[in-house]
Amino acid sequence: MLHQPSIEISGNSGCTVRLLTHDQRIMVEKECALPSYIPRLQAQIRKQNDFRHALTNPAIIVPELYDEADNPGLYSARMEFLPYLNFIDFLGVCSVPALMQSIKAIEGFIDHNLRTDYQTVNTSALLKLDEISRNISGEPQKQEIDQLFGNKLRDLLTKKEINIPNGWCHGDFTLSNIVFSANGNCIGLFDFLDSYIDSPIMDLVKLRQDTHLHWSLTKSKKPISHLRVCQGLRQLDIFAKRKLSALGISGKEYNILQSVNVLRILPYANDTTTLNFIQTSLKTLED
């Protein structure tokens, strides 16, 4: 029997996340009552489970799924709680060796998921831009941003073919979905998502959404030791930028892929901070 009270720790789009205790064990429960979102949450849980069973690297931890409850109009999943540090707490106190260990773990995750064959992503990216435009219909401020930056991206994507390695990807590889052991030897991953392009390259692009553009830092409400956290983000960004280059992704190609990635936030942007982030980031990626 679950013991109350539970603690609601965050809210994702479409689901509620709680900490629960059972038999002196802490677990995470994700619950969704929105019919339109339930299939997406179920797909996330399946992807998380698939990754957990495929991984062999002890430095990568994916939560164990304990149970699921699929009732009419309500779906929930309970899983292992990872007692690690979020990125702000970790970067605020970690030693240089611990940071280097965490970078090694991230690189191991990327390398594990890489394949040797390649895909051309232009058509997928153009289709995603069209989907974004449809999803902001009737919202003039968002449409203005889309017209300014989306049309430039369409032009670039019709002129330059972008080829990237195939492979598995987390789908939402931002620092908000990564936790760190204090010594950096292990990282925990959660909140897997489907991606419009399946490739570890897209995970590196997502990572740089934080290390380059500071998305999660902008959205965080935690007090931070700003200098140390930013120094840590800089080191993570150096790694991610070099890794992309080593995998054959040029700076211009990164800018295009990241711009599409940032524009994907636009339909869900309901506050000035997020809209400002999108516009500022897209301008940065144009330079």
Image (cartoon, helix red, strand yellow):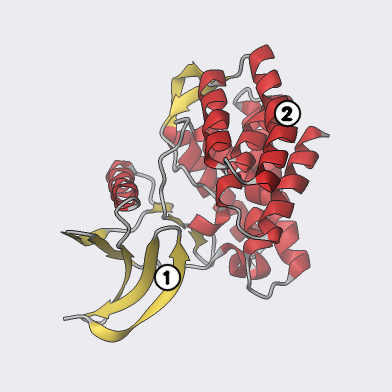
Image x and y of residue 118, in percent = 49, 17
Q: Which mark is residue 229?
A: none
Q: Residues within 10 Å of mark 1 (few under 14, many from 20)?
A: few
> Which percent across, then down, holds residue 254?
67, 31
Residue at 56% from the left image edge and 46% from the top image edge: 267
Quadrant of residue 189 in the image?
A: bottom left
Q: Is residue 127 left or right of residue 276?
A: left
Residue 142's spot in the image, x, y percent? 66, 45
Quadrant position of residue 206: top right
Q: CA distance from mark 2 to mark 1?
A: 36 Å
Q: Is residue 212 visible?
A: no
Mark 2, residue position: 251
Tag 2: amino acid: Gly
Q: Residue at x 70, y 47 (%)?
A: 141
Above/below status of 267 relative to 168: below
Q: Is residue 242 above or below residue 152?
A: below
Instruction: Give the secondary structure at mark 1.
Output: loop
Task: Tell me if I can see residue 224 in this picture.
Answer: yes
Q: Tell me the element at label 2.
A: helix
Image-based side of 40 in relation to 173, left or right: left
**Nearest to N terminus: mark 2 or mark 1:** 1
Q: Which residue is mark 1?
A: 83
In the picture, measured across the screen, residue 81 lies left or right of residue 131, that is left
Compare residues 209 and 64 and report the one nearer the observer.
209
Q: Is residue 88 left or right of residue 69?
A: right
